[in-house]
Image (spheres, grey):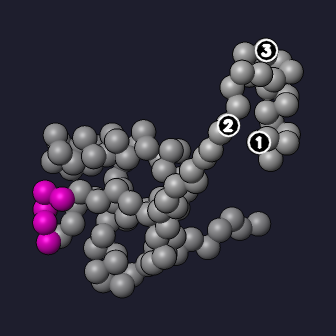
Amino acid sequence: MFDEFLWPQLAERSKAFEAVKVKSGYVGHYDMNDFDANAIFGRWSKLPNFIIAAGFSGHGLQHSPAMGRAVKELIIDGGYQTIDLSRLSYRRVEENAPLLDEGMKA
C-alpha cells in the first residue's frame, strides 16, 4: 500500500521524496495479551520493584504518554496520582479474573 499508493502522492508533493525510497522494512513484534486483550500494567506482586507495562495489542504508541506518567507516579510518588490504573494490574492474571470489554452498546 505504501509503495503503490502513499509514496507516489508524497513524491508528487515534495521532490525530496523522489530521493527517499524504502529499501527494506521490518514489521516488528506485536505485543498481544492473549489473557484478555488489555494492557497489563503495574507492580508485580512477587517483585514489588518490578513494574510491568505490556500487552498493549498494537496501542502502545497511543498509550505511551499515560503509561510513562503512571510509571513515574509509581516510582516517584509511590502510587497513582493522576489516574488509577489498578484495574490493569497483573493481579487479575494471578487471580484468573480477566478484564473483559463488552464493546460499545447502542
Residue 6 visible to an observer of this rendering: yes
- Can you see residue 88? no
Q: CA distance from mark 1 to mark 2?
A: 9 Å
Question: What residue sits right under mark 3 in the picture?
Answer: 15
Three-letter amino acid code at the position of disc 1: Phe
Residue type at mark 2 is Val
Residue position for label 2: 22
Q: Are marks 1 and 2 in contact (CB under 8 Å)?
A: yes
Three-letter code, disc 3:
Lys
Q: Position of residue 56 (x, y in %)?
A: 48, 59
Magenta highlight range: 46-50
Q: Is residue 99 magenta?
A: no
Screen quadrant of the C terminus:
bottom right
Mark closer to the chain start, 1 or 2? 1
The location of residue 25, given as percent across then percent down, is: 60, 46
Q: Between residues 27 and 30, which one lies in front from this camera angle?
A: 27
